[in-house]
Image (cartoon, rainbow, N blue to C red):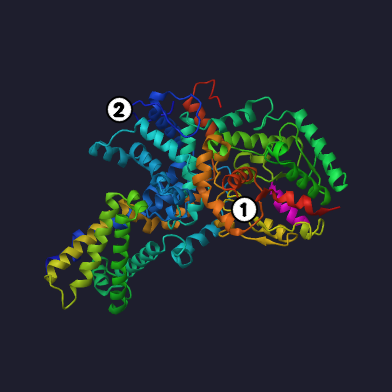
Amino acid sequence: MPTWLILAKGPAFFFTLAVFVLGLLRLIVLTIWDIAAAIRRAGDRRVPYVQIARQTLSWLVPFKHLHRARALYSFASFGLHVSLLFAVLFLRNHLGILQDNIGFSWFTISKQILDFLTVIGIAGALILLLSRMYVIGSRHLSKVSDYLLLILLLNIFVSGFIAGRAWNPIPYDGLMLFHTLNGMALLLVTPFTKIAHCALFPLVRLGSEVAWRLMPQGGSKVIESLHSPEGRKI
Amino acid sequence: MANAPTLKNSSAQPPQYSYHVEPTVDPDHRAEKFLAAFAAILRHSNYRFILDLFARTSARCGRCAASCQVYQASNEPRDIPCHRTHLLLDVYRQYFTTRGEFLSRVLGQDSLSNGKIDEIAECFYRCLACRRCSIDCPIGIDHGLMTHLGRYILSEAGIAPKGLVVSVREQLEGASGNTSAIPLPALLDNLEFLQDELRDMKGAAVNFPVDQEDAEYIFLPAVSDYLMEADTLMGNAAVLHAAGTSWTIGSKYFDGINYGLFYNDWILERIIHKLAGEAHRLKAKKILIGECGHAARTARQFLPAFAGEQSLPVVSILELTWQAIQQGKLKLSPTTITERVTYHDPCNIARSGWIVDQPRHLLRSFVSDFVEMNPHGRENYCCGGGSGLVSLDETYEFRMKVSGKTKAEQIRASGAQIVATPCANCKKQLRELMDFYKLPVQVVGVHDLVLRAIEF
């Protein structure tokens, strides 16, 4: 068995998967706990859940939003997200590894469709990378981690795409080892980087709304803790 | 004193802001003060969880840059909403999270400097807090909330615009008890004058009731309307009279303005208590807010949060007027307003509120040539003076050349001769913009037009 397959079916991968799942689960639980606590402390506990759910859903299928701002970037980003989700979750090879690791998997999608989506994913990641490099506003906002994560994604997409091609000039097993290591790295960093939005996304709009529900007497307590008994002058 | 992180080094430089600040902060210890205030606010508020959530999910995609009118006009990266939010998130991460503290020790990151605080103070007062960027954020980060929090921390560290502070001081601790320092006798004289004006203009005995107990509504406009917007007030009173509504103005408190929204939660809550107290004293059943965006938003959003059992339903005068039209209680001549009219949405009641369709229905019911600006409604552009900037005269050049530029272009493109907007702050900013860009456009309140068209 080649090294990459031993790695993918071995304890290292299982550990990586556990970090990914448990790490994200921890973030979800913490966030829900925090939001619930914030609502309990708030003076006004009415939260428009239905409206927030609608807004959140409209961004999960964001066709009506994409053209509104930075259209090229937005479509590229959407393509990248769709491609990543489908390639990770529905590629036969991935599901085989999942079956070996946790004992179950689900249906797959045809390789032709996934190949097409992978090309979109590569194009999307490249556009995002070039935007970060050459669009002034984007460049200013970008940190090293933003570039590294995009490069990690590109590594995964490109290596996965060309590995199975007849014209692939790189040794198959070496390329697949590269693909597997990058994939594991992505899973490992997900709970600790901005990619955590893959799990926390449904809670951000709710959190934004809840944070506006201020605590009664909160301001007075801040004044008491910062100033002398005479209190703060306006 | 709340437990605050300590700083190793801090270079003392005199603070330089584009707005006036009272000398209440020790210039050598701005960073220390900022961290102490940040720590205290985290301990006694609901803000910590949202900082954690934003810090974990913000993708820094920069989409907000495309929807921010300030950045679009200035092209300065410091005006990108996400950049501003990350100024705060970076401080939070470094000083108030275990992981951030550990990493900053390992990586030997610089301590927060006075210069960094000045950068934060400058950036957070270039934001209009219009929240337009939030509707385009794919993740759902509310940069307006971060501006609100950032300014709150700054103000507790002693950095807040003098223009806002002085007004609030008069409102909460001054003899007049309102932001425009109008003494009660002057208000009563003014109301008498307005009654006479209305009688002469419309031939109707419209009353401005004061201290009437058990009225349906206690009425609170932006108090500056009493000095500057006679037509708006007369329009309000004319509608209330024609609709047969029982209403009153409170003599102990008659100011709808709440600048706390722009810079400090403690102030915000105190003003809400004042408002609720006066409504309670007069046993009013509802609170009616005049033509003022942030006054309507603060009352509606924060009365239930802070006033407890004294909380009352909050109604905007625009809702009431539209309802009166629907009920056939108002006669508005469809031939009086012949000019082309457009409507500017105040951000605080449109994007952050519930007033979008009502004023449009209202205006269309008697204005023959009504046009929309593009975009409008919840996606409108701010007037350019939002978040209290319009009250700071020293920001005039910024408001004209940068933050208000897009709005001026929008109004020019509409071809309107009149811009109607139900907000004292928006009106001031738009009038200055029309002068600055030499646009022959009249800026009025919605009820100024109602006053012209109403028939008794």
Mark 2 residue type:
Asn
The answer to which of B282 and B298 lies nearer the viewer is: B298
Q: Main secondary structure of the magenta part?
A: helix
Image location (x, y in percent) of residue A44: 58, 45
Q: Is A170 situated above or below B225? A: below
Mark 1 residue type:
His
The stretch drawn in magenta includes residue A143: no
Looking at the image, can residue B404 be seen? yes
Q: Are marks 1 and 2 in contact (CB under 8 Å)?
A: no
Assign a secondary structure to mark 1: loop
Q: Chain of mark 2?
A: B
CA gap between label 1 and label 2 equals 48 Å
The answer to which of B385 and B314 lies nearer the viewer is: B385
Instruction: Name the residue at 81% across, 36% down.
Output: B193
The residue segment tinted magenta is B313-324
Residue holding disc 1: B344
Q: Chain of mark 1?
A: B
The answer to which of A24 and B141 lies nearer the viewer is: B141
Instruction: Name the residue at 56% across, 30% down.
Output: B165
Quadrant housing the N terminus of chain A:
bottom left
| Mark 2 surroundings within 10 Å by alpha-carbon count, few (fewer than 14), some (14 through 19), many (20 or more) | few
Image location (x, y in percent) of residue B77: 38, 47
Instruction: Please give left or right for residue B216 compared with residue A29 in the image.
Output: right
Residue A234: image quadrant is top right
Residue holding disc 2: B9
Q: Nearer the viewer, mark 1 or mark 2?
A: 1
Image location (x, y in percent) of residue B67: 47, 55
Instruction: Name the residue at 52% across, 38% down.
Output: B395
Between discs 1 and 2, the one toward the N terminus: 2
